[in-house]
Amino acid sequence: MLYGMGTVVVFLTTLVLATRLMSVLLSRFSGPEPKGDSLPSQPSLASGAHLGRSVDPRVLAAVTAAVHTHRATRN
């Protein structure tokens, strides 16, 4: 039992050390991190941006009715 537990402890310790070593090596040899200012801004879908596309009023009405019905039947 001690041999098995010792094997597991040695394996897990080796695994943690190898993971940390790989992390250090990757951060050292990877390219420079891109600056947040140089990236083009992407509008998020959650903010309501439609990227120039409009929503059909009939589709919007159907989705609104479906959400209202779902919320009414859920309670």
Image (cartoon, rainbow, N blue to C red):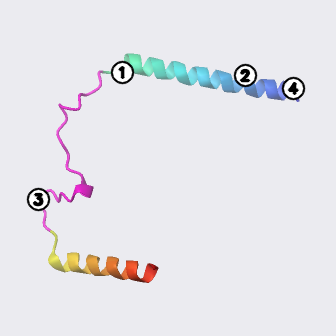
Q: Which residue is mark 4?
A: 2
Instruction: Magenta stretch: give its range.
Output: 32-54
Marks 1 and 2, how far apart in space? Answer: 30 Å
* Residue at the spot 58% in from the left edge and 21% down from the top edge: 18
Label 2 CA crowd tier, 10 Å (few <14, some 14–19, many 20+)? few
Determine the image quadrant of residue 14. top right
Q: What SS does tag 3 mark?
A: loop
* Residue at the spot 33% in from the left edge and 76% down from the top edge: 67
Determine the image quadrant of residue 54. bottom left
Residue 27 lies, in percent from the top left, at 40, 21
Q: Where does the N terminus fall, quadrant-wise?
A: top right
Left or right of 21 on screen, residue 39: left
Determine the image quadrant of residue 55. bottom left
Q: Which residue is mark 2?
A: 10
Q: What SS does tag 1 mark?
A: loop
* Residue at the spot 29% in from the left edge and 25% down from the top edge: 33
Compared with 47, 10 (above or below) is above
Mark toward the start of the polypeptide (3 vs 4): 4
Q: Which residue is mark 1?
A: 30
Q: Magenta segment: does it hold 28? A: no
What residue type is disc 4 on? Leu
Q: Give the mark toward the camera: 3 or 1.
A: 3
